[in-house]
Image (cartoon, rainbow, N blue to C red):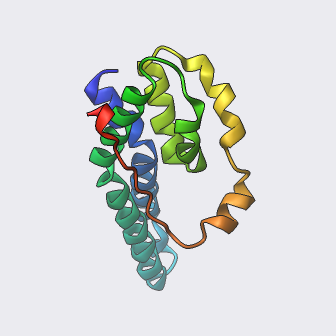
Amino acid sequence: MNKIFKFIYLNTYSFLLLFCGIISILVPFYKISKVLFIPQVIVFFIFFYYSVKLFSTYKDKLIKCDILLKKNKDEFRPETFKIFMQAPCGRLVTKSVLQDLNQKDKYKELLIYKEPFFVSVKNNFKPTKTSIYINEEFK
């Protein structure tokens, strides 16, 4: 996958949040009332903050893509994708890796690992950090 296209693809949700923030600041609520401008700016900064936060994970996503590519280079191992199927950004990583492996059709098999929306919200209400340990054989 081309580097620029991969950057845009893996940061789809970052761009989406950024555009939502830009749209929220461009809506002319100040013409209705000057007081509405303050919540509008607050909403913009919330979108912008989370957008920047997601943009900062790009290098981590590339490392995870590389690890998944190495683990699945010789044979397809669905269990290695299980943790990535829990979040939307992880599913983008999964799709990117499958495209690099020329196995896009395997994504349907991985959908069994995807949690329903309400279950994932309930389980992930508090943010958690995912750690991946690299075995010596994959270096």
Horizontal arrangement in the rendering, residue 114 relative to residue 60 (left or right)? right
* Residue drawn at point x = 41 percent, y = 76 percent: 42
Relative to 22, say whether 39 is above or below: below
The C terminus - image quarter: top left
* Residue beneath the point at 32% across and 32% down: 138
Q: What is the x, y in percent for residue 72?
A: 46, 25
106 and 40: which one is in front? 106
The residue at the far bottom in this view is 35
The residue at the far top in this view is 102
Q: Position of residue 87 (x, y in %)?
A: 56, 50
Q: Nearer the viewer, residue 29 or 75?
A: 75
Q: Position of residue 133 (x, y in %)?
A: 37, 49
Residue at the limit of the structure toward the front, as seen here: 136
Q: Which quadrant of the rendered structure holds the N terminus?
A: top left
Image quadrant assignment for residue 25? bottom left
Is 26 drawn above or below residue 8 in the view shown?
A: below
What residue is at 31 percent from the left and 39 percent from the top? 62
Question: Residue 113: x and y, percent?
Answer: 67, 42
Query: For residue 65, what is the image quadrant?
Result: top left
* Count of numbered circles on the image: 0
Check the image and report above or below for 73 versus 136. Answer: above
Of 98 and 72, the residue lying toward us = 72
> Which residue is pictured at 31% across the width and 46% down the height?
58
